[in-house]
Amino acid sequence: MICHDENGFYAAGLGLSLVTAALVAAGFVFLSFMKLTMTERADMELHQEVDDAMRMVTADAEESASFRLHPHGDTLQLVFQKAHADAGGERSVTYATKRDGERVKFCRSREAALQPLTGESEAGDVTMEEFRAEELRPGCLHVVLSGRSQRTGHAYRQTAEFALEMKR
């Protein structure tokens, strides 16, 4: 009779060990999946913010007759001058970067204060690493936007060229 109780005790101990191992494995798989999901979400946010910012630059470049580049220390301002005032009566659009704590945000203004286009999402924790605009030849503008997710460390870069009339 004692052997039967010992076998039951060993079986219960073995069963408990197997259940514990299964729960630990399931927890590990769940946490790994959550980390992968958060990494994917952060990288998607990075791509979306840089792509959307470049789309805004492209749209304003297409509506503009000219551009000006204004270096300010270690930052740059790109100003598009529109051929005709838009519905709000604004004739120029400015792009620049602005430091906000540990992040650098890419911003756009329409004759007012700079409004951030990137870095507003906590999911991606995006900071701009590079905003460069240079004249390749008269009237041809080359723009580079590069961001990095502070969550994943991954970087994403977009470039574009625009042919505009240059007014100094």
Image (tube, rainbow, N blue to C red):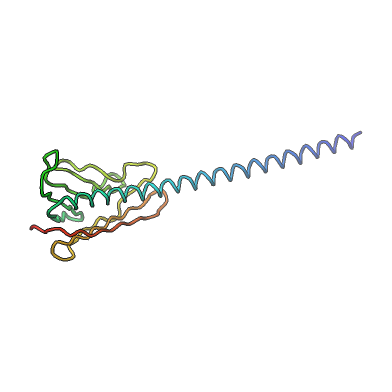
* Residue farthest toward the left in the current orientation of the protein: 168
Name the one closer to the observer, 133 or 7.
133
Name the one closer to the observer, 117 or 88.
88
Answer left or right for 154 relative to 51.
Answer: right
Give the mark count: 0
Q: Is residue 138 above or below residue 145?
A: below
Q: Position of residue 19 (x, y in %)?
A: 70, 39
Name the one closer to the observer, 139 or 63.
63
Q: Position of residue 3 (x, y in %)?
A: 89, 37
Answer left or right for 168 relative to 131.
Answer: left
Name the one closer to the observer, 119 or 142.
142
Residue at point 16% right, 47% down?
93
Residue at point 64% right, 40% down?
23
* Residue farthest toward the bottom in the current orientation of the protein: 137
Q: Quadrant of the C terminus?
A: bottom left
Residue at point 80% right, 39% down?
11
Q: Position of residue 127 (x, y in %)?
A: 32, 49
* Residue farthest toward the right in the current orientation of the protein: 1
Q: Position of residue 150 (x, y in %)?
A: 38, 49
Residue at point 27% right, 47% down?
105
Q: Quadrant of the N terminus?
A: top right
Question: Quadrant of the rendered structure where residue 13 is?
Answer: top right
